[in-house]
Image: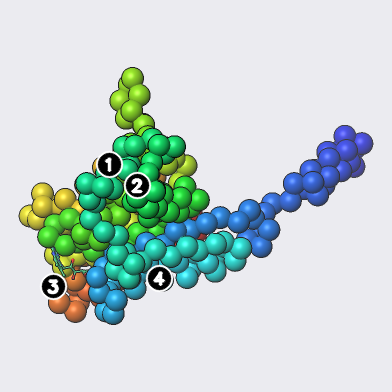
Amino acid sequence: MTSNKVWTDIGGWIARLLNPKPSPETEIMSTLLHINSSVRINGSASRQLTSEFVAKWQAAHPNGRIVERDLAVAEVPHLTEQTIGAFFTPADQRSAEQLDAVRLSDELVAELVAADVIVIGAPMYNFSVSSALKAWIDHIARAGVTFKYTETGPVGQLTGKKVIVFTSRGGVYSEGPAKSMDFHETYLRGVLGFVGLTDVTFVHTEGLALGDESTATAFSKTRLAMADLVAA
Ligand SMILES: Cc1cc2nc3c(=O)[nH]c(=O)nc-3n(C[C@H](O)[C@H](O)[C@H](O)COP(=O)(O)O)c2cc1C
């Protein structure tokens, strides 16, 4: 062995000692925010699938932290005049009532800011998201907080996060005659991107009202996609 090779080997060994490749046990703790929005607590396809994904993610990231946000259990109210008034009042000038009015929104935004991975269960209701998920969106899309107006237009602030949306749908919208009625992915992709969440993967489990075979095929396809997404 030449002396150069010996020094290269020793150098590599020292580098590995100082910067070991992180194993799942030693990697920096990441946080997954798990959001469900089906009003069905039992028998919900989107809940079933987000739960399966989160369990797999936890197995792959034993140090990972999971934060649960269930929009059917802890309902987010519709916006009111008082809430939007509080949103548009500078934080240091808010009254006690206005501080109360923004508390939930601030909590929901803080959950997003702290998350590295965001998993959303999103059933299709009337060609778009459930009103529970829409109410959550109304509380997290905040001018001056999650997006800012600049000279070149609005800029989303929630950058550097990965989002995975598990949709569930009675019909089929990813292809075929109903494609133009998909205001579900198009809306979510648009509004998430507006607040800076641009790395979004949609996994559609659809055709759930079209019989047992269609349902079984849809679940199998989603579970296959899930395995790749956990590994990514
Ligand atoms: C109020 C309501 C509206 C729905 N609207 C649609 C729709 O527009 N298109 C569709 O394909 N399925 C629709 N469905 C079917 C759901 O998308 C489907 O049952 C899905 O599995 C619901 O998600 P979940 O199983 O997680 O509750 C609707 C269901 C409900 C309860």
Q: How far, Cα to Cα, is label 2 from label 1? A: 8 Å
Question: In the rendered view, does 17 fall on the left or right side of 134?
Answer: right
- Ligand 1 closer than 8 Å to the CB at disc 2? no
Disc 4: residue Cβ within 8 A of ligand 1's nearest atom: no
Q: CA distance from mark 3 to mark 4?
A: 23 Å
Q: Amino acid at mark 1?
A: Gly
Q: Residue furthest right?
A: 3
Residue 51 badge: 4
State the SS at label 3. loop
Indicate which disc residue 98 carries: 2
Q: Secondary structure at mark 2?
A: helix
Tell me: residue 42, above or below residue 71. below
State the separation of the CA atoms marked 4 and 2.
36 Å
The mark nearer the N terminus, 2 or 1, is 1
Name which residue lies at 40% across and 37% down. Answer: 93
Q: Quadrant of residue 49?
A: bottom left
Residue annotated with mark 3:
210
